[in-house]
Image (spheres, rainbow, N blue to C red):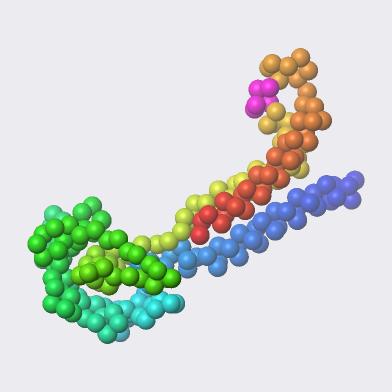
Amino acid sequence: MITRLRKIQSPTLIFFSCVVVASVIVGFLSKPYFTEHIFYADNQKYLFDRKEEQQMIYRSRTADSIQVQVEQQKRTVFIDNQKYIITEINSKPNPTYSVLYPNGRKYEVQDQSRELRSFDEEGNIMTSVTFYVNNQRILSEDEEQYSPDTIVTAAYPVYHYTQGQPVYLFLALAGLIFGWCSFYYRNFQDLLFLLSLRWIWVNDPEPSDFYYLMTSIGGIVVMIGSVWIAFKAF
């Protein structure tokens, strides 16, 4: 009796043990990915590296680092040996910033419901459209390498954000459990049959062998789909 019980429970124990181990490994390895704040500059991803006195340094795997010098009402951003000076004009009702470029041009950036809008020296709103040829960015006439809103984003961590959607991992976990129960447990398949209310419209209220087969196949499909959902978290 004990041996038979162990045989019945063995696949379930193996399955849930693998799920628990995989969940712990994925959770541990993906925690930095979901918790680190990032921003993009010229299509390069940056994240916080370290702080040296009044200077914050952000690193990228594919580009040179960005340094931000922090002062009271002013911040200076250093990118590619170029200096950009950001001054906070006002903080209420909507934060507004002045951005001075190395070429002497000055732009204004407004925070409109947490979305940064850039304006040129004449007060016209700026739109950012970038063109690439052979993976090389082509700048149009009078176009800046880094838009004013990008400079402000780099200067103020409040505009950095986390990446990914970890909720998909929980959905994938729930899908794996549901798929396994649909595939392996006859009682769970019977419960799904009752919940489907199919027994109301049939003469024979008992599930057929074909129903059990399709439910098992459906469980396999759900488990495969759960793996795909897990990848959508990243």
Residue 229 to residue 46: above or below: above
Magenta stretch: includes residue 105: no
**Residue 171 location in percent, x, y?**
55, 48
The reply, left or right, for residue 200 in relation to residue 40 is right
Residue 128 visible within the image: yes
Quadrant of the image occupied by residue 71? bottom left
Residue located at (22% from left, 69% from top): 141
Residue located at (26% from left, 68% from top): 140
Q: Main secondary structure of the magenta part?
A: helix
The reply, left or right, for residue 65 in relation to residue 224 is left
Residue 120 to residue 222: above or below: below
Q: Who is closer to the viewer here, 124 or 112?
A: 124
The reply, left or right, for residue 74 in relation to residue 189 is left
The reply, left or right, for residue 69 in relation to residue 175 is left
Report the span colored magenta: 194-198
Quadrant of the image occupied by residue 169? bottom right
